[in-house]
Image (tube, rainbow, N blue to C red):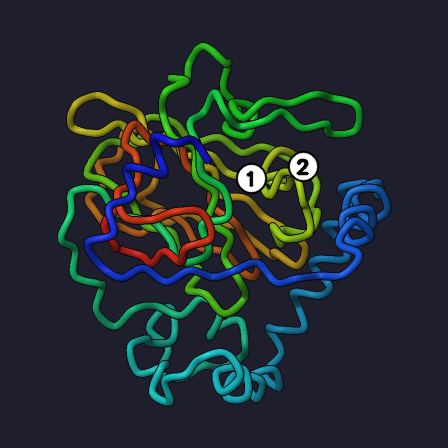
């Protein structure tokens, strides 16, 4: 991480840091993800993922919710802050829990916020993000967002937030602005866990299926978001009102994941309160 970004993180309030798990033989996991699973045709990866995702739509899967919460959350009343999706009165399956909604959106105290919840697994200026080899094609960070290199300001900041299965899986607008572009990019569904990739935790974002959304802020600066899928992601869904030309406000929902995900962003602002491997939360000051 660059010195400038390191210095910009002012610790005037407590942040939570999640140290990457120490995995033995991590290179084997990377090899399996990229060279074995990743070498399968994308259509086959997608088929297996859809079959896997269907398990969590079965009614019997709702019985996984309580033990899952007990395993992953210290708060015994964790679910009290959420409601089942789409006006349902209860969680009919595990997928309902996965795409749970806030009863009340978090209070915001900043004009720039984090759009999602998860581990900030990668952060640096755009020009410092390394290239990666995708099946013989050398790709740069601008290709994650489906843009030509000259379109993105190299002094802007790239961030990658990994959303674990336990995290809230809806993506919200980080600013007030206007959606200027939406783009779907087909791709693979390699494993998202950043600790599988020792040298570049953002490798999956370079090659996986994703939806890119650009939002122009009130000063005409573009915030680029890339919503990246992974294995078992049934769908990346956008609300009907999210389309080019639409106005969005801070915390407006712009996307949701049905299982597994990561969210990359290129912004004109430097995060003020977070460093690599810290936990970020929807609505927290960026």
**Residue located 58% across and 48% down the image:** 229
Residue 228 is drawn in which quadrant?
top right
Up-down relation of residue 123 to residue 82 (above or below):
above
When asked about the image quadrant of residue 206, the answer is top right
Label pair 1/2, CB-CB below 8 angstroms = yes
Which residue is the extreme one toward the top?
150
Q: Position of residue 72 (x, y in %)?
A: 50, 78
Assign a secondary structure to mark 1. strand
Reply above or below: 211 against 171.
above
Image spot of residue 44 (x, y percent): 80, 48
Q: Secondary structure at mark 2?
A: loop
Vertical side of 159 occupied by 50: above or below: below
Residue with the mark numbered 1: 210
Name the residue at 38% across, 53% down.
116
Front-lying residue, 286 or 64: 286
Specify few, some or many for label 1: CA neighbours under 10 Å numbering under 14, 14-19, or 20 or more. many
Residue sticking out furthest to the left: 109
Query: Number of marks in the image?
Result: 2
Task: Residue 181 in the image: state x and y as whole percent.
Answer: 38, 27
Of the residues under marks 1 and 2, which one precedes in the sequence?
Answer: 2
Q: Which mark is residue 92?
A: none
Q: Which numbered dot is residue 187?
A: 2
Q: Which residue is pictured at 50% across the width and 70% down the height?
A: 166
């Amino acid at each position: 991480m660059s010195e400038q970004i390191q210095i910009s993180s002012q610790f005037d309030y407590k942040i939570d840091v999640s140290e990457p798990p120490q995995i033995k033989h991590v290179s084997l996991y990377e090899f399996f993800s990229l060279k074995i699973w990743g070498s399968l045709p994308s259509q086959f990866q997608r088929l297996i993922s859809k079959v896997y995702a269907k398990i969590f739509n079965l009614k019997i899967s709702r019985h996984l919710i309580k033990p899952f919460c007990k395993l992953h959350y210290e708060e015994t009343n964790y679910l009290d802050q959420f409601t089942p999706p789409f006006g349902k009165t209860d969680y009919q399956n595990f997928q309902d829990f996965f795409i749970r909604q806030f009863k009340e959106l978090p209070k915001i105290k900043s004009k720039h916020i984090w759009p999602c919840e998860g581990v900030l697994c990668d952060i640096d200026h755009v020009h410092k993000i390394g290239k990666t080899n995708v099946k013989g094609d050398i790709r740069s960070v601008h290709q994650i967002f489906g843009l030509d290199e000259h379109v993105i300001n190299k002094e802007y900041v790239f961030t990658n937030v990994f959303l674990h299965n336990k995290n809230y899986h809806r993506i919200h607008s980080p600013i007030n602005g206007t959606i200027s572009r939406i783009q779907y990019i087909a791709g693979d569904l390699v494993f998202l866990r950043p600790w599988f990739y020792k040298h570049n935790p953002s490798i999956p974002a370079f090659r996986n299926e994703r939806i890119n959304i650009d939002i122009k802020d009130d000063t005409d600066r573009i915030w680029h978001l890339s919503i990246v899928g992974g294995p078992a992601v049934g769908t990346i869904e956008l609300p009907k009102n999210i389309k080019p030309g639409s106005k969005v406000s801070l915390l407006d929902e712009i996307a949701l994941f049905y299982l597994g995900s990561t969210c990359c962003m290129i912004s004109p602002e430097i995060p003020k309160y977070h460093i690599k491997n810290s936990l970020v939360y929807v609505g927290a000051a960026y």
